């Protein structure tokens, strides 16, 4: 089976390497030279060069020049693992087996943007890893392989990201032989059960200390590395917060955002219900006890 591969993030890189490790026939790779959009951008070209795989940097993947370039390599199927723009029907219909996409969620739940971040923000206890045949909708095609993944209180974006990647790599190794042999089943999604995640904005990353300590904890763990980070405003400056801890101390809800104490590098702050400890942060000038963070 001749496989063309599309991707530009860390998962793309690991998936491409795993495919080569299990001797998949990768005939071409479509990627980006850089990305200002993907915080987990990864360069796929060293893998391509070491394995003598033709590759092409693209911006608009749906441009006729890029479509014609893919056609040259006559793929039986296209794998699109880690790409942030929709593919038009000219690419979706290019290969006989179509395009196999990937979404780190339990489709049809959580279609759309930032599917690793939002479940953490919302405090969900379960997510998933889904490979599906792409159509012109948003994450709406028939499912090839799907696994459930528990989300624990201790999980942050880094841990969950890697947990999902490891699950997905095992899935690839399991379904590829059946895919090559044509011995696989497609499972239609129940569109009546679909939910959608919106695009995250910069304002979603602001820590609001009038919210509960759990809501603050969930926001910070969701946006920590490899993502952009949640933030507070101090003296009109944006300061990133990378890790917080919920404490048992009951706060005074009339003083949300008040700094109670500082110990070493840690900052104790009132939330709506509990005291929150800012454990990892980017303060260059430390605030003082009695000041407020907004």
Image (spheres, grey):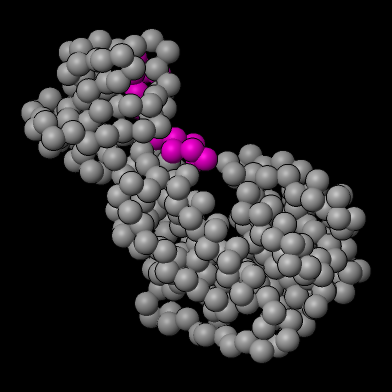
- Taking the image as shown, residue 138 lies to the left or right of residue 266, namely right
Total count of labels: 0
Q: Is residue 66 above or below residue 131?
A: above
Q: Is residue 270 a member of the stretch shown in magenta?
A: no
Q: Is residue 229 a member of the stretch shown in magenta?
A: yes
Asked whether residue 131 appears in the rendered view, the answer is yes
Residue at (20% x, 16% y) in the render: 261
Q: Is residue 97 above or below residue 88?
A: below
Residue at (17% x, 30% y) in the render: 275
Q: Quadrant of the C terminus?
A: top left
- Which quadrant would residue 174 be assigned to in this image? bottom right
| Magenta residue span | 224-237
- Which quadrant would residue 264 be assigned to in this image? top left
- Taking the image as shown, residue 277 lies to the left or right of residue 193, namely left
> At which x and y percent is residue 76?
80, 78
> At which x and y percent is residue 282?
43, 21
Q: Quadrant of the N terminus?
A: bottom right
Viewer-side residue, 264 vs 44: 264
Residue at (37% x, 77% y) in the render: 193
Q: Is residue 45 above or below residue 107?
A: above
> At which x and y percent is residue 146?
50, 74
- Which quadrant would residue 238 be assigned to in this image? top left
Residue at (17% x, 13% y) in the render: 290
- Taking the image as shown, residue 86 lies to the left or right of residue 287, namely right
Asked whether residue 294 appears in the rendered view, the answer is no
Q: Is residue 242 above or below residue 145?
A: above
């Amino acid at each position: 089976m001749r496989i063309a591969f599309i991707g530009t993030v860390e998962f793309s890189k690991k998936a491409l390497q795993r495919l080569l490790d299990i001797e998949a026939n990768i005939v071409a790779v479509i990627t980006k030279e850089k990305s200002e959009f993907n915080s987990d951008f990864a360069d796929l070209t060293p893998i391509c060069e070491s394995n003598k795989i033709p590759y092409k940097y693209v911006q608009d993947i749906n441009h006729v020049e890029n479509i014609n370039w893919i056609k040259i390599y006559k793929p039986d199927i296209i794998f699109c693992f880690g790409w942030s723009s929709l593919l038009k029907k000219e690419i979706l219909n290019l290969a006989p087996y179509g395009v196999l996409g990937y979404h780190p969620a339990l489709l049809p739940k959580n279609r759309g943007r930032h599917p690793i971040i939002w479940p953490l923000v919302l405090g969900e206890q379960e997510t998933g890893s889904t490979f599906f045949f792409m159509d012109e909708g948003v994450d709406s095609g028939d499912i090839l392989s799907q696994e459930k993944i528990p989300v624990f209180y201790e999980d942050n974006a880094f841990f969950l990201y890697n947990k999902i990647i490891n699950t997905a790599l095992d899935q690839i190794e399991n379904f590829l032989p059946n895919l090559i042999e044509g011995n696989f089943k497609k499972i239609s999604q129940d569109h009546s059960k679909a939910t959608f995640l919106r695009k995250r904005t910069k304002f979603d990353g602001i820590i609001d200390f009038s919210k509960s300590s759990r809501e603050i904890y969930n926001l910070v763990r969701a946006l920590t590395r490899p993502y952009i980070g949640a933030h507070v405003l101090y003296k009109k400056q944006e300061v990133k917060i990378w890790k917080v801890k919920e404490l048992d101390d009951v706060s005074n809800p009339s003083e949300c955002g008040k700094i109670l104490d500082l110990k070493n590098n840690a900052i104790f702050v009132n939330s709506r219900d509990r005291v929150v400890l800012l454990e990892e942060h980017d303060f260059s000038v430390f605030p003082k006890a009695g000041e407020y963070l907004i």
